[in-house]
């Protein structure tokens, strides 16, 4: 289950990345990525839900990023790191279907796979601050 959920999160991240960097239409991007994704129906629905909810709550999620990554203007955070943070902050503060620890771990793993050498440390630091706030 962990592997298939991680793959689903990776596909959701790819969709968010493409939408953020190209402004392509969300539904078309998700449909194309899922057509080649090889996911179960349940995990395909998980991807659709993640992407739709992140996009629906993007302004509020971005406010949280600005609050917790104060040294970095949102526009200067790499597109991949910004969208990993959006995905994880959605799971931590809005969704509550996985534990904070799992959400952070999944985000760090995505950062290791798709981000730069420093991405996982950056993502972990920002999400550590988010989780401390979430637990208050």
Image (tube, rainbow, N blue to C red):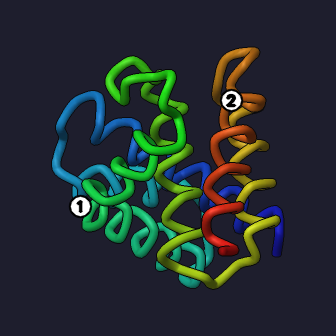
Label 2: which secondary element: helix
Does residue 67 appear to the left or right of 5 in the view shown? left
Separation (CA) of disc 2 from disc 1: 30 Å
Measured from the top left, where is residue 17 in percent x and y? 40, 37
Q: Residue at x 63, y 84 (%)?
A: 97
Residue toward you, 62 or 6: 62
Does residue 63 appear to the left or right of 83 in the view shown? left
Measured from the top left, where is residue 43 in percent x and y? 59, 75
Residue toward you, 118 or 8: 118
Q: Which residue is mark 2?
A: 122
Relative to residue 25, is residue 117 depicted above or below? above
Label 2 Cα neighbours within 10 Å, binned few <14 / some 14-19 / many ≥20: some
In which image quadrant can residue 103 be found?
Answer: bottom right
Measured from the top left, where is residue 113 in percent x and y? 74, 32
Does residue 58 appear to the left or right of 116 in the view shown? left
Q: Residue at x 75, y 15 (%)?
A: 117
Label 1 Cα neighbours within 10 Å, binned few <14 / some 14-19 / many ≥20: few
In which image quadrant can residue 18 be found?
Answer: top left
Disc sitting over residue 98 in the figure: none
Relative to residue 98, is residue 37 depicted above or below? above
Q: Name the N-terminal-most of marks 2 and 1.
A: 1
Disc sitting over residue 27 in the figure: 1
Q: Residue at x 47, y 79 (%)?
A: 45
Q: Residue at x 49, y 67 (%)?
A: 47
Task: Please state which of the two labelled residues, at mark 2 or mark 1, is closer to the viewer.
Answer: 2
Relative to residue 25, is residue 133 depicted above or below? below
2 and 1 marks in contact (CB < 8 Å)? no
Label 1: which secondary element: helix
In the picture, the quarter occupied by the C terminus is bottom right
Residue toward you, 112 or 44: 112
């Amino acid at each position: 289950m962990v592997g298939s959920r991680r793959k689903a999160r990776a596909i959701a991240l790819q969709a968010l990345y493409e939408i953020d960097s190209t402004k392509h239409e969300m539904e078309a991007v998700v449909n194309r990525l899922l057509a080649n994704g090889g996911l179960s129906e349940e995990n395909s629905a998980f991807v659709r839900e993640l992407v739709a909810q992140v996009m629906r709550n993007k302004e509020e999620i971005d406010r949280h990023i600005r609050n917790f990554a104060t040294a970095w203007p949102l526009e200067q955070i790499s597109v991949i790191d910004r969208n990993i943070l959006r995905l994880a902050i959605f799971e931590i503060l809005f969704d509550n279907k996985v534990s904070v620890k799992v959400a952070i771990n999944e985000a760090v793993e995505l950062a290791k796979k798709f981000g730069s050498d420093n991405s996982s440390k950056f993502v972990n630091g920002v999400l550590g601050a988010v989780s401390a706030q979430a637990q208050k």
